[in-house]
Amino acid sequence: METNERSSGGTMPDSPAKANNVPILQARNVSKHFGSVSALENVDFELYPNEILAVVGDNGAGKSTLIKILSGAYQPDEGELLMDGQHVSFKNPMDARRHGIETVYQDLALAAALDIASNLFLGREERRAGLVGSLLRALDKVRMRREAADHMSSLKIGLRSMRQPVETLSGGQRQGVAVARAVSWGKRVVIMDEPTAALGVKESGMVLELIKAVKARGVPVVLISHNLPHVFQVADRILVMRLGKRAGIAKPGEQTMEDVVALMTGASRAEIAAAAG
Amino acid sequence: MAESPLSAAPVTEPSVVSDSGRKGLSGGVVSRVDLALRLGLLGIIIVVGIYFAIRTIPSGNLSDIGQSTFISTGNLQNIARQMAVVGVLAVGETFVIITAGIDLSIGAVLGFSGIIAAQRFIAGWPTPAVIVTVLLLGIGIGLVNGFLVGGAKVPPFIVTLGMLGIARGAAYLAGNGLNTSLSPTGEPVPFSNWASDTSLLGIPNIFLVLAAVGIAGELFLRYTRRGRYVYALGSNPEAARLSGVNVLAIIVLVYAISGCLASMAGLLQTGRLNGANPNNGLGNELDAIAAVVLGGASLFGARGNIIGTFFGLVLINELANGIDLIGADAHVQQAVEGLLLIVIVWVDQWRKRRIASA
């Protein structure tokens, strides 16, 4: 197997092009236990600028525990987190958000009854200029709609009316709004949890294109997915988890899906090929 | 990339809609539903109004419609006065219901505040001092409700049902269960005169209070950050929290507004009746909730506004007044109001479902 079986920290031999690059977000030797169950054991993670990193693994492999640590929902029992090589610790998800890590959750944290512009600006609404804004606290809805439309079109999300309530959108369009929201306002890392899980073929394709558009804007993406074909379509690197450990790193183009399945399950490639054939 | 990833699916790529199995409605549809509901309600208000106008012509002759009791200035002023008290309650209830909460305590808070107001007037306090005291009382009760709902996570139905009991009990205890007259010896207090008076164009003063409160409420909900958070909270509290909205603060705010307006309604009621009874406001919370729901709000939150609530109020008060005028039993009015509430919300649900599956 040509993938890197590693369990210790250090530089990344599997990405020589990025070897002199500092990871934008990094975890070193993190472990997490729930009672006697060890959900994560000495796992390393590194996300480089301008890449799409997929995290794959079977149920219980530790994907979500790792992601929850990176997004501040859990605190690691051991190990450390770094951003741009500097130590960080996230007490809660808001803390991670303040560091520019935005997570798009499976259940889409949008206020469905509000329109697209309101959702994009939720929590950071802009007021009107002058006394109307400062004294009467009136919102500048026109400006927010215009900026929302600009932002959506810069991500090539072609929703026409920013006044459309999110609940009237299709699943893929909602995902689009959630992602647009995540990459707005100078976010540095976007984590997406199963973004295509509930979507049809065509809508999944749109979301995958959107993930590439996010990367093209210079925002690296961590993509958690069960769907290997989707992962192979967009990911630059694939972090494979197995039984709470880092099983290895694969690269589309250098490794095949069978290789990744072998890493995920611990079976040999020959066994996988035999099963597939 | 060859094409935009999410190019306006419902319009330019109908296949996307079938892929996902969801209908992408254009933005206008929902507001059209809203408008249809509003116009439907307005239509009912007009039809019912015409019916009562015709039924209350003294001569019974259609050409004497000008003499109709129902549309006489005096009666319209009467309706406006009756509307004002429950209306102020309903404005506060609208805020709470948009957050997917409910405030059952407002009728009892009205009663309690009314007694306290009457006693302070009798004690000779100046009017502004009475107003401030009573409004602070309502805000205090609302704050307790808000912290119990938002902080202690007790369901709003339970918190405010409990508060209903507490406030109603307090009203009886404070008033010794008796009527408290503002002027046992004769002259009404100035506030009472003002509350029963009409102003410019013959509009009753307390109706102007309702108008001011309603307009302020609508502007707040529509144009301010916190107003928007009220809807966001009703739609998805988790999304609001993740967006950095202080959810507890918004919950406390809406219950404080509701409590404040309930005590304002108590104040107006006491002024209008030139006295207070601990039974005042009994069941008024249900009238307020009915008005809010008739106006298009959803008990599941995130829907509704003050304009809709106002239409709901007009219909309820028009019915109460008209049924009274045509000499029907007062209990008929209660039954008709209940029936209407069910039918209108039912039709509304049916229409929404039909549009959603169109």
Image: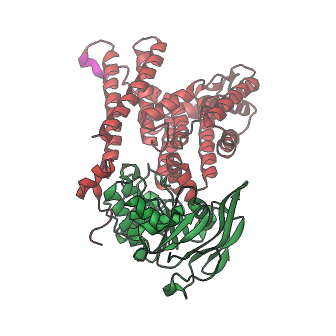
Chain colours: A green, B red
B276, above or below A196, in the image: above
Q: Which residues are magenta?
A: B62-72
Residue B63 is covered by the magenta coloring: yes
Q: How many marks?
A: 0
Residue B42 spot, x, y in % from top left: 34, 33
Q: With A52 as the anchor, is A201 left or right in this view?
A: left
Question: Which residue appears farthest toward the bottom when viewing the image?
Answer: A20
B226, above or below B177, in the image: below
Residue B252 spot, x, y in % from top left: 64, 46
Q: Residue at x 45, y 43 (%)?
A: B303
Q: Residue at x 33, y 16 (%)?
A: B55
Residue B98 is covered by the magenta coloring: no
- Which image quarter holds the C terminus of chain B? top left
Q: Residue at x 34, y 58 (%)?
A: A203
Q: Is residue A35 visible?
A: yes
In this view, the residue in front, B83 or A226, is A226
Q: With B62 as the anchor, is A18 left or right in this view?
A: right
Residue A185 spot, x, y in % from top left: 49, 70
- Which image quarter holds the N terminus of chain B? bottom left
Q: Is residue B197 visible?
A: no
- Which picture quadrant has residue B285? top right
A37, above or below B170, in the image: below
